[in-house]
Amino acid sequence: MKRVWVAEDPVEVPTKTRVLDALLAGQCQVKMACGGKGLCATCHVYVEAGGEKLSPKTPREEAAIQMLVNKKPTSRLSCQAKVLGEGIKVRVPTGRYIESTVELESLVGRRAEGNILHPVTGIILVEEGKIITRSRILELSAVNVDVAEMKARSATLVPAS
């Protein structure tokens, strides 16, 4: 068993477990819009310690990370990174990923409690504190297309091992 720190909380997982599974075991809310196949940003994490104790980045993961607007040198996709050693600490980027503009419909007229993020690129769609308007949702209709394209690609891939 290896210990992975999710924010400030330790989670015990078997060796070669995906960081994603540690996040889920730690009760972290993760969307996995692509089904854990390394195509989207919804499981993106920053590795704050122990990055060398994770499996190497796959070409698929590298390509997905390059699309992220909020990437850092320590960025990883938690669905692709596997725990190989002790002392890994990860942090989930702040904000809420959406999978479709329908998710925002129920929030029309409210202020965004946190940044609302694009599920493929991580770009901020609605800034924290801004009022979510119906016209803004119409402007974001391309998100639905981006997600549909990503899910179509995802259906043709097997999870990276």
Image: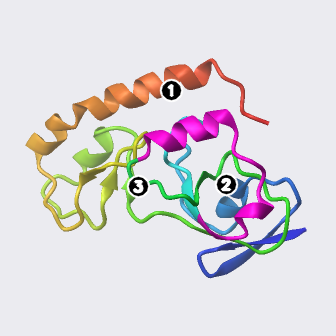
Q: Earlier in the sequence, mark 2 or mark 1?
A: 2
- Nearer to us of marks 3 and 2 is 3
Q: Return the residue at label 1.
A: 151
- Nearer to us of marks 1 and 3 is 3
* Location of residue 34 by image quarter: top right
Q: Do the residues labelled 2 and 1 touch (CB within 8 Å)?
A: no
Q: Earlier in the sequence, mark 3 or mark 2?
A: 2
Task: Residue 90: give x, y in percent of width and height.
Answer: 62, 68
Q: Do the residues labelled 3 and 2 touch (CB within 8 Å)?
A: no
The range drawn in magenta is 47-68
Above or below, 155 against 43 in this view is: above
Residue at the (56%, 44%) spot, across then down: 32
Task: Residue 122: give x, y in percent of width and height.
Answer: 39, 48
Q: Return the residue at label 3.
A: 70
Q: Which amino acid does label 2 sit on?
A: Leu
Cα distance in 3D space between marks 3 and 2: 19 Å
Cα distance in 3D space between marks 2 and 1: 19 Å
Q: Return the residue at label 2.
A: 20
Q: Assign a secondary structure to mark 1.
A: helix
Magenta stretch: residue 52 in it?
Answer: yes
* Location of residue 138 by image quarter: top left
